[in-house]
Image (cartoon, rainbow, N blue to C red):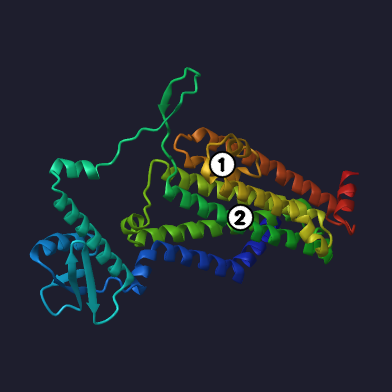
């Protein structure tokens, strides 16, 4: 155990001190702080909030209808009686025409607010000229009730209410972030662990190593050290995101971008973290096994091709299946171990998904990880001193 811990600590702290680990972690955490404070950053560089004094040259009836309408669109515009920075003159009332004279250019949003307020006031003028009653005006602006029905699934010929769109934008953002983060870290650490194993074998350093520690013990120490570093990075990024979330004006940010939580939000956060960690463990275990087949650095990219392809397929299934998370194809692929960490959390975007599929997916991944680690240890033990130049030759040698 002492030799295992020595190898574990050496690998763990060497990766922990690496510039790539520190820079990547800091960049992602900084990106999270920027994302959670995006509204403040936009306000910092946006001049739309500068107060504008607007002088209106029109009769009282127009002013009484226009002023509250304008305030509802933009409360940074103040109507004054004289000496305004801009002057709005009503040139004609039938039809309504106006011009604005300014000392300096005003922002595009303020121009749009004034234009919308004029259009709304013009509609009010038109309604008055038509002599409509309050009931007729209310009827004109009332929403049309409509009910969407779909055929019932029991072949009875009846129709039932269609399901509402269950997709929650905030949950989609959380899922997107977890999938992209997992994909990036898998590609990064899978390459690192396979490179380390192949580099030791190609430089013949392994002959000195296996004289003091068993090959399987050495491999497992490296694998668990790399897994620990990747999991630690995920936890640091998650903690940084929670801190950024806590210190940001969350309600204002969510309102500005139309994001809101629902009963699935906490569930999807927890399961996304679990599946990201399990996905890293699984793919790094596979990368370690594939690295065991490699005796030359020239074969490294070829050896890692299965990890790259499987992770890319899972990644694209997850992102491409956003619009049909309840489809049977998504359900089937979510139980394939190498796609499970990417696809299973996708099913949580549908509100009727319970805990049972998530727990089954976790059990499948844990069993696959155990089998993969056992296979990696077997392959490494049989090929650790191999000098064969090709991957296929190493595979044939192990099968003997």
- Whole-percent x and y of residue 67? 15, 63
**Residue of label 1:** 344
Q: Residue at x 27, y 65 (%)?
A: 115
Query: What residue sits 8% from the left and 65% below the top?
Result: 60
Horizontal and vertical percent position of residue 336: 65, 39
**Side of 267 where 298 appears, left or right:** right
Which of the pair 342/129 is nearer the observer?
Answer: 129
Which quadrant holds the C terminus?
top right
Q: Which residue is mark 2?
A: 183
Residue 321 horizontal/vertical position (percent)? 56, 44
Q: Decide if residue 173 is in sight here.
A: yes
How many callouts does the rendering have?
Answer: 2
Q: Secondary structure at mark 1?
A: helix
- Is residue 104 toward the left or the right of residue 254 in the image? left
Dot 1 alpha-carbon crowd within 10 angstroms: few under 14, some 14 to 19, many 20 or more: many
- Name the residue furthest left: 60
Residue 147, label in figure: none
Left or right placement of residue 253 versus residue 103 in this view: right
Separation (CA) of disc 1 from disc 2: 15 Å
| Residue at image coords 50%, 60% | 236
Q: Position of residue 68 (x, y in %)?
A: 16, 60
Determine if residue 209 is in view. Answer: no
């Amino acid at each position: 155990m002492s030799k295992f811990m020595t190898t574990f600590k050496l690998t763990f702290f060497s990766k922990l001190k690496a510039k790539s680990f520190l820079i990547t972690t800091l960049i992602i955490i900084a990106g999270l702080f920027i994302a959670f404070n995006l509204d403040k950053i936009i306000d910092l560089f946006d001049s739309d909030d500068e107060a504008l004094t607007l002088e209106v040259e029109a009769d009282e009836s127009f002013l009484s209808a226009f002023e509250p309408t304008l305030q509802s669109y933009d409360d940074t515009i103040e109507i004054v009686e004289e000496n305004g920075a801009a002057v709005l003159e009503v040139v004609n009332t039938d039809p309504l025409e106006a011009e604005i004279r300014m000392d300096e250019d005003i922002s595009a949003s303020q121009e749009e607010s004034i234009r919308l307020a004029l259009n709304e006031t013009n509609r009010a003028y038109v309604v008055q000229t038509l002599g409509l009653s309050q009931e007729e005006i209310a009827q004109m602006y009332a929403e049309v009730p409509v009910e969407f029905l779909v055929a019932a699934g029991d072949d009875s010929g009846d129709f039932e209410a269609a399901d509402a769109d269950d997709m929650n934008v905030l949950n989609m953002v959380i899922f997107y972030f977890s999938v992209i983060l997992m994909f990036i870290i898998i590609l990064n650490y899978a390459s690192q662990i396979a490179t380390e194993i192949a580099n030791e074998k190609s430089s013949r350093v392994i002959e000195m190593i296996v004289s003091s520690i068993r090959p399987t013990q050495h491999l497992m120490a490296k694998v668990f050290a790399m897994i620990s570093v990747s999991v630690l990075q995920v936890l640091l990024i998650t903690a940084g995101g929670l801190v950024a979330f806590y210190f940001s004006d969350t309600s204002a940010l969510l309102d500005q971008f139309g994001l809101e939580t629902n009963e699935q939000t906490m569930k999807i956060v927890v399961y996304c973290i679990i599946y990201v960690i399990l996905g890293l463990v699984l793919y790094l275990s596979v990368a370690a096994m594939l690295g065991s087949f490699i005796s030359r650095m020239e074969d490294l990219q070829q050896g890692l091709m299965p990890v790259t392809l499987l992770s890319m397929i899972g990644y694209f299934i997850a992102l491409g299946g956003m619009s049909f998370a309840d489809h049977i194809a998504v359900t089937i692929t979510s139980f394939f171990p190498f796609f499970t960490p990417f696809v299973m959390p996708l099913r949580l975007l549908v509100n009727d998904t319970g805990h049972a599929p998530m727990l089954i997916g976790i059990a499948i991944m844990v069993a696959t990880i155990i089998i993969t680690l056992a296979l990696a240890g077997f392959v490494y033990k049989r090929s650790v001193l191999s000098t064969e130049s090709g991957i296929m030759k190493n595979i044939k040698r192990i099968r003997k």
